[in-house]
Image: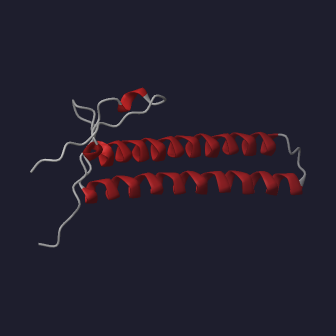
C-alpha cells in the first residue's frame, strides 16, 4: 500500500518546485544552517565595527580620562563580542557534528542523522 504524496509547490520560492514532503527536514536544516551562518557573519562584522569605533575614540580622546575609559570599555566589549561569536560558531560546529549533519554535497542537501542510544 503506497500513498502518493503531492510535491511541494510555492509560487514565491522557486527552489521548492518538485520537492516532496519527505525532503522538508533537509530544506529546513539548510535554511537554519544558512541563517545561523549569516548571523555569525553579522555578529563578527558588528564586533569589528565596534572595535574600530573604540580605537578611533581612543585616538581622539586627547587625554580626557572619561573618554579614554569609555574607548577602552568599547574595545574590551568588542573583543568579548568576538570571543562570544567564535564560541557560538564552535558550539554550532560541534552540534552539527553531534547530530550528524554533513555539508551540502553534490545534491545540495543536508542529511540529518539523529543520534541513537543503542
Q: In this view, does 64 lie to the left or right of 6?
A: right
Q: Height in image: 110 above or below 16?
A: below
Front one among 33 and 77 = 33
The residue lying at 24 percent from left, 46 percent from top is 111
The residue lying at 89 percent from left, 44 percent from top is 62
Say how many tags the image has: 0
Q: Position of residue 64 (x, y in %)?
A: 90, 51
Q: Height in image: 8 above or below 86?
A: above
Front one among 47 and 61 = 47
Q: Is residue 89 left or right of residue 104?
A: right
The residue lying at 29 percent from left, 44 percent from top is 21
Q: Where is residue 73 in the image (x, y as percent from the top left)?
A: 73, 57
Front one among 53 and 112 = 112
Q: In which quarter of the image is the C terminus?
A: bottom left
Residue occupying the far left of the picture: 1
The residue lying at 12 percent from left, 47 percent from top is 2
Q: Is residue 99 left or right of residue 1?
A: right
Quarter location, residue 6: top left
Q: Where is residue 26 in the image (x, y as percent from the top left)?
A: 30, 45
Residue occupying the far bottom of the picture: 117
Q: Where is residue 47 in the image (x, y as percent from the top left)?
A: 62, 46
- Colour mapping used in the image: secondary structure
Amino acid at each position: 500500500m503506497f500513498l502518493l504524496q503531492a510535491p511541494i509547490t510555492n509560487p514565491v520560492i522557486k527552489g521548492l518546485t518538485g520537492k516532496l514532503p519527505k525532503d522538508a527536514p533537509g530544506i529546513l536544516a539548510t535554511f537554519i544552517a544558512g541563517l545561523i551562518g549569516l548571523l555569525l557573519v553579522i555578529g563578527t562584522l558588528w564586533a569589528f565595527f565596534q572595535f574600530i569605533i573604540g580605537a578611533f575614540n581612543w585616538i581622539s580622546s586627547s587625554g580626557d580620562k572619561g573618554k579614554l575609559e569609555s574607548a577602552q570599555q568599547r574595545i574590551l566589549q568588542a573583543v568579548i563580542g568576538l570571543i562570544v561569536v567564535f564560541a557560538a560558531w564552535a558550539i554550532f560546529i560541534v552540534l552539527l557534528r553531534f547530530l550528524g549533519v554533513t555539508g551540502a554535497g553534490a545534491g545540495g542537501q543536508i542529511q540529518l542523522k539523529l543520534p541513537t542510544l543503542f
